[in-house]
Amino acid sequence: MRTLFPPYAHPSPEHAADPDTWVVQEHPGRRRSRHHALGRVDLDWGGRSLADVLADVDSWREDGAEGLFLDRAPAGSGGVGPVALIVRLAARRGLHRVVLNPGVPTHPLYRDLGVQICTFDGAWTSYQGWAGDGVEPGDGHLVHGVPAEMLTAARRLMGRRGAGFGLATDASPYGGGTLSEAACEDAADSADSCTTSGS
């Protein structure tokens, strides 16, 4: 399973480069990892203007990111057209790897866009009882707030649910969390340490 570190958790600079590890960067020009970088673009559930989104896309292209992490993406059928346009325009700018993060299962039309989709982005307490309706094998799962002693169980549950990429971490997107070494070992199958991004 490919490891995708969200902006609030990332591998330490000493972590060996790994083609199966992707790190989402919050802002251009602040590269903190030797791993493949995805630039975060906030879609605000479809509420941002195309001009503002494309300005972010251009900033990531100039920064040298390998792709985009379209965060807070819409999941309903009304958002397919705008997201498809963003994906096409990003590809024209050389950003072909796109991860869509609505954090929930999407309308089936999103599957035709040729992007990877995070169909779960939330707390461990929610993930445990999550039914997983509308997901497909290979989708991404981002699970935060996992107690350190439950990281192995969380990783196994992700595997049983068919996650193709993602992360189980004890860090929190709301700040104040610390990413333990065990979180990195479980997520990236490595003994190298990880750190929270602090952004």
Image (cartoon, rainbow, N blue to C red):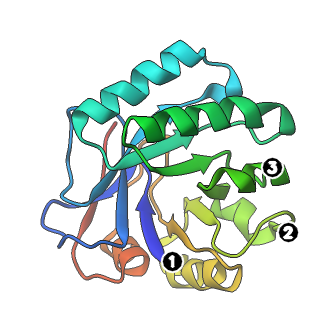
Q: Position of residue 28 (x, y in %)?
A: 27, 32
Which of the numbered marks, if any, corresponds to residue 151? 1
Task: Identify which residue, 148 or 80, lies in the foreground.
Answer: 80
Q: Nearer the viewer, mark 2 or mark 1?
A: 2
- Dot placed on the residue nearer the N-terminal end, 2 or 3: 3
Disc 2 secondary structure class: loop
Q: Position of residue 72 (x, y in %)?
A: 62, 37
> Looking at the image, can residue 182 be seen?
yes
The amino acid at mark 3 is Leu
In the picture of the structure, the residue carrying the numbered disc 2 is: 131
Distance, label 3 to label 1, CA atoms, is 33 Å
Task: Determine whether, in the image, residue 175 is placed left or right of residue 45.
Answer: left
The image quadrant where one finds the C terminus is: top left
Distance, label 2 to label 3, CA atoms, is 21 Å
Q: Nearer the viewer, mark 2 or mark 3?
A: 3
The relative height of residue 54 versus residue 72 in the rendered view (above or below) is above
Disc 3 secondary structure class: helix
The amino acid at mark 2 is Ala
What residue sits 55% from the left and 80% below the top? 155
Disc 1 secondary structure class: helix
Q: Position of residue 22 (x, y in %)?
A: 37, 60
- Dot placed on the residue nearer the N-terminal end, 3 or 1: 3
What residue sits 30% from the left and 44% below the top? 65
> Looking at the image, can residue 28 be seen?
no
In the picture of the structure, the residue carrying the numbered disc 3 is: 109
Residue 30, quarter of picture: top left
What residue sits 32% from the left and 50% below the top? 66
Task: Identify which residue, 170 or 157, lies in the foreground.
Answer: 157
